[in-house]
């Protein structure tokens, strides 16, 4: 790369915006890795996407593959694979959608509910550990600042609560 190209790139990489996005990504990936390790330690063999689907089904029983894919920000094909695994493991059931003809709707089973509820407790501990270096007021401030940033982005994804 020519020196004239390095200067603007270096300025970008040193910018607050770039550093913030890198740190957010590292936090997300780090939390995901630690959560999955802790879940396994508790005998819970769920990936983050699988756990998210189970949580969505708690809030939206009877959701379709397409609805779950939108809520989870994955393709319908990826969601199909996730649901196949969850169904195989007895964590969700499928049935014809009550009014959408060939569309299938999904519900979480009692086993899935117990697993994701216990998993949420484990995940909360991991998150609390990572954010525990901040005072409660700082944690609230961080959430507020991130919400303001997210609000500036166009999105077709369902907003997280």
Image (spheres, helix red, strand yellow):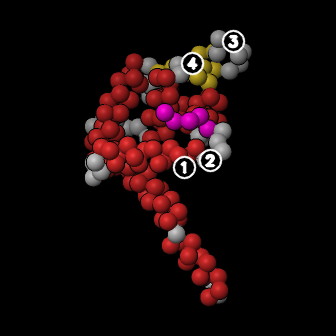
Tell me how far mark 3 sits from mark 1, CA to CA: 38 Å
Give the structural element (helix, strand or loop) at label 2. loop
Q: Position of residue 107 (x, y in %)?
A: 51, 19
Task: Check the image and report above or below for 9 versus 160.
Answer: below
Judged by its main secondary structure, the magenta piece is: loop
Residue 5 located left or right of residue 34: right
Tell me how far mark 4 sits from mark 3, CA to CA: 11 Å
Q: Look at 44% across and 41% down and name the residue there.
A: 47
| Quadrant in the rendering for residue 77 | top right
User: Which residue does the numbered mark 4 point to in the structure image?
Assistant: 62
**Are there few (<14), some (14-19), or many (20+) residues within 10 Å of tag 2?**
few
In primary-sequence order, the first of circles 4 and 1 is 4
Residue 35 counted in the magenta span: no
In primary-sequence order, the first of circles 2 and 4 is 4
**Are there few (<14), some (14-19), or many (20+) residues within 10 Å of tag 4?**
many
Residue 158 counted in the magenta span: yes
User: Which residue does the numbered mark 1 point to in the structure image?
Assistant: 149
Q: Tell me whether circle 2 and circle 4 mark residues in contact (CB < 8 Å).
A: no
Tell me how far mark 2 sits from mark 4, CA to CA: 29 Å
Q: Look at 50% across and 28% down and name the residue there.
A: 56
In primary-sequence order, the first of circles 3 and 1 is 3
User: Which residue does the numbered mark 3 point to in the structure image?
Assistant: 99
User: Which residue does the numbered mark 2 point to in the structure image?
Assistant: 153
| Quadrant in the rendering for residue 62 | top right
Q: Tell me whether circle 2 and circle 1 mark residues in contact (CB < 8 Å).
A: yes
Q: Look at 53% across and 22% down and name the residue there.
A: 60
**Are there few (<14), some (14-19), or many (20+) residues within 10 Å of tag 3?**
few
Tell me how far mark 4 sits from mark 1, CA to CA: 32 Å
Q: Position of residue 109 (x, y in %)?
A: 44, 19
């Amino acid at each position: 790369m020519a020196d004239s190209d390095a200067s603007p790139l270096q300025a970008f990489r040193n910018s607050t915006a770039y550093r913030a996005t890198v740190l957010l990504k590292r936090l997300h990936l780090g939390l995901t890795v630690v959560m999955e390790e802790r879940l396994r330690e508790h005998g819970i063999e769920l990936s983050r996407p699988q756990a998210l689907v189970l949580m969505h089904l708690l809030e939206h029983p009877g959701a379709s593959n397409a609805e779950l894919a939108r809520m989870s920000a994955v393709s319908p094909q990826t969601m199909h694979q996730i649901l196949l695994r969850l169904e195989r493991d007895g964590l969700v059931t499928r049935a014809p959608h009550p009014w959408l003809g060939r569309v299938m709707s999904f519900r979480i089973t009692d086993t899935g509910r117990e697993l994701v509820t216990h998993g949420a407790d484990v995940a909360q501990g991991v998150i609390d550990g990572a954010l525990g270096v901040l005072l409660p007021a700082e944690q609230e401030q961080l959430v507020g600042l991130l919400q303001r940033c997210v609000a500036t982005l166009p999105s077709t994804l369902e907003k997280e609560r």
